[in-house]
Amino acid sequence: MATVTVWLRNRTSGVLSAPVTLTYDVGMTHGQQLTRSNIGPTGPLQPSGPIVTTQDDQVFENLDITGFLDVRHNVTLRNCQIVGDLGQGNAAYTIKHQRNLGRKLTLHNCRVITRSPNTKGLVSWGNGQTDAADSLFLGGTDNVYLKPGTAPASGFAHTFTRCFFGDVQRTPGSHSDCFQIDGGAGGVLLDRCSINSFSLATGEDPTTAQASVNSRASGGLILTYPSGAPEQIDRVQVVNCYFDGGNYTLDTVPPDGPVPTEVVLAGNTFGLHHTYGPIRTGQGQVTRDNTWAVSGVTTTGRAVIAGQPVE
């Protein structure tokens, strides 16, 4: 384990808090890259149609769900696959978790596939919570789109541990990301995840490809604010993750609205397939021990030419 000490500034008074110590796990190699084969569901799955939860504490296991999941209660899915297609009931989202009811969605060893470039994967805003582990989020215009509401008494509203994000489908003129946080102060943690925000054409050289082509994602993880209604983003922690691709691969500076606070980016590893740079951060945000995968050298945030040595 490693620790970093930060001081938090009150948005209204400008007064600094007492020192706050944050702890993160460095037991795994910096941002060790997950693969599609070592997480997600295993074994035979039973076919199922779309699911709308009906009561708290339902548990679904070993299902191959076609259509969508509508989360209205506390619910757990284990060893399941959810495949969303445009036009099947809940067309805009493969997992709809945005009724502001404060319910918790638990996904363990699951695979979420969104086949349409006009559909988002997991969408949650308001006071809902998510605990996802050892799961894959693939396809769609965004793999995950969050606007966290009230923070829980402890921890984070949304936690993703050992999850894989990728295969984002970008429609020309649109903005697509593996993981977007669009305002909200409930807190988000990504721990030991793999964020792959580019898709190479067949036969394309991965050492020279760039992310500016329309068929590729705009970003890996990005913080934004809704137009005209910024709602302060607080408490985003990204630790021991692997990132590659996108414009800025990890972008914690929204184009408008206040700089997000309590942001910690530590122990992450970056590939070379970005357009502008691996990290863009704002004043007061903590970055530590973030390195290039190819060399182990600490990143400076500057862009590099894909395929060239990183010194």
Image (cartoon, rainbow, N blue to C red):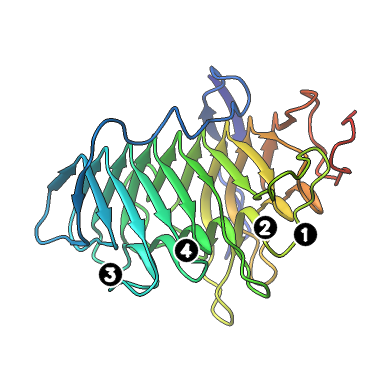
Q: Are marks 2 and 1 in contact (CB under 8 Å)?
A: yes
Q: Amino acid at mark 2?
A: Arg
Secondary element at tag 1: loop
For residue 184, the mark is 4
Q: Amino acid at mark 4?
A: Gly
Comparing labels 3 and 4, the label whose residue is closer to the camera: 3
Q: Secondary structure at mark 3?
A: loop
Question: Would you call the spot at circle 1 few (<14 residues within 10 Å), some (14-19), or many (20 or more)?
Answer: some
**Badge 3 amino acid:** Arg
Distance of mark 2 from mark 3, alpha carbons? 31 Å
Q: Tell me the element at label 4.
A: loop
- Most extreme residue toward the left is 55
From the viewer's perspective, tell me whether residue 273 is left or right of residue 184.
Answer: right
Q: Label 1, on which residue?
A: 212
- Frontmost residue, 126 versus 175: 175
Measured from the top left, where is residue 214 in percent x and y? 71, 65
Q: CA distance from mark 4 to mark 1?
A: 28 Å
Q: Crowdedness of circle 4 by 10 Å Cα count: few (<14), some, many (20+)? A: many
Quadrant containing the C terminus is top right
Residue drawn at (80%, 24%), measured in percent from left and top? 295
Cα distance, mark 1 to mark 3?
A: 35 Å
